[in-house]
Image: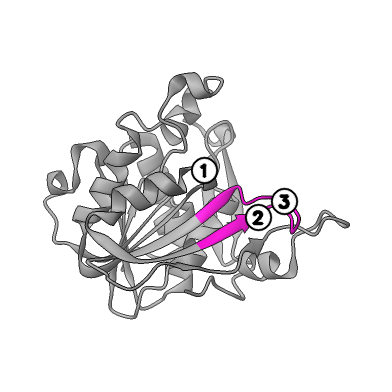
Amino acid sequence: MDDTQVTEDRVLNGRIRLRQRADGYRAGMDAALLAAACDAAEGDRVLDAGCGVGGALLAAAGRRPGVRFLGVERDPEAASLARGNIALNDLGDRVEIATGDIEAGFRALDLPVFDAAISNPPFFDDPGALRAPAPAKSGAWMADGGLAAWTGFLLKAVREGGSITIIHRADRLGDILAQLGAKAGSFRIRPIQPFGDAPAKRVIVRALKTGKAPLVLLPPLVLHDRESGRHSAAAEAILRGDAGLEW
């Protein structure tokens, strides 16, 4: 892959540089929101399952300077770009990449459990549910082993009391709750609406392994103003890194 196939973008108001394929899956709003939802404490170890080129991983690291991160990615090209992005941002002292397949399970990585895990799993597991994506994007869009492979991986990846944070399609919320609910609880759910008068298209779900607190449905985050079409003030503050998503 030569440099003509790669663009360099800046996130968090320019604090993080991100090289990614021009024709592949590109980190965007979902990655920014996932990073903003990572609330790891200083000294914690955080795993990003399916990190791609590091969009959410590096933005989360930029927001949490006292936290160590590991990204797991099965695609060698994306993993190579992620490693390059770590070096580009001088984060090699506390951010690493492991090449591995989520569907092989957490134990295949032979690592100690983490304090927290974040993930933006592929949104589809039925090839008949959408027009086939471009080959360079298929791994990011299609979960070969289904969503259950990802939730199972995340449950194994964190210690008891550790947090799991997922961004996904709003219509999969029931599946996420059912799949995590056998071993996790204390759910907190943040709907993400494109406009204030539109249904949520995304949800961010945070759960604690072995948590017992009641489920909490939080106020939605509205991304755009209907009249202007621009980002809402809340969304703009998140994209610039001036605000996070509080739990």
Judge whether 233 appears above or below 223 on screen.
below
Quick one: label 3, few (<14), some, or many (20+) residues within 10 Å?
few
**Residue of label 1:** 171
Q: Are marks 1 and 3 in contact (CB under 8 Å)?
A: no
What's under tag 1, amino acid-wise?
Answer: Asp
* Earlier-in-chain disc, 1 versus 2: 1
Residue 233 drawn at (x, y percent) = 74, 70
Q: Do the residues labelled 1 and 2 touch (CB within 8 Å)?
A: no
Quick one: label 2, few (<14), some, or many (20+) residues within 10 Å?
some
What's under tag 3, amino acid-wise?
Answer: Ala
| Residues shaded magenta | 190-203
**Residue of label 3:** 198
Tell me which corner region of the image, top left, top right, bottom left or bottom right, holds residue 121. Answer: top left
Q: Residue at x 80, y 57 (%)?
A: 230
Q: Residue furthest front?
A: 214
Q: Is residue 38 left or right of residue 3?
A: left
Q: Which of marks 1 and 2 is in front?
A: 1
Q: Residue at x 80, y 59 (%)?
A: 225
Give the CA distance from mark 2 to mark 3: 6 Å
Q: Residue 193 carries which label?
A: 2
Tell me which corner region of the image, top left, top right, bottom left or bottom right, holds residue 184. Answer: bottom left
Q: Which residue lies furthest to the right in this view?
A: 227
Give the CA distance from mark 1 to mark 3: 14 Å
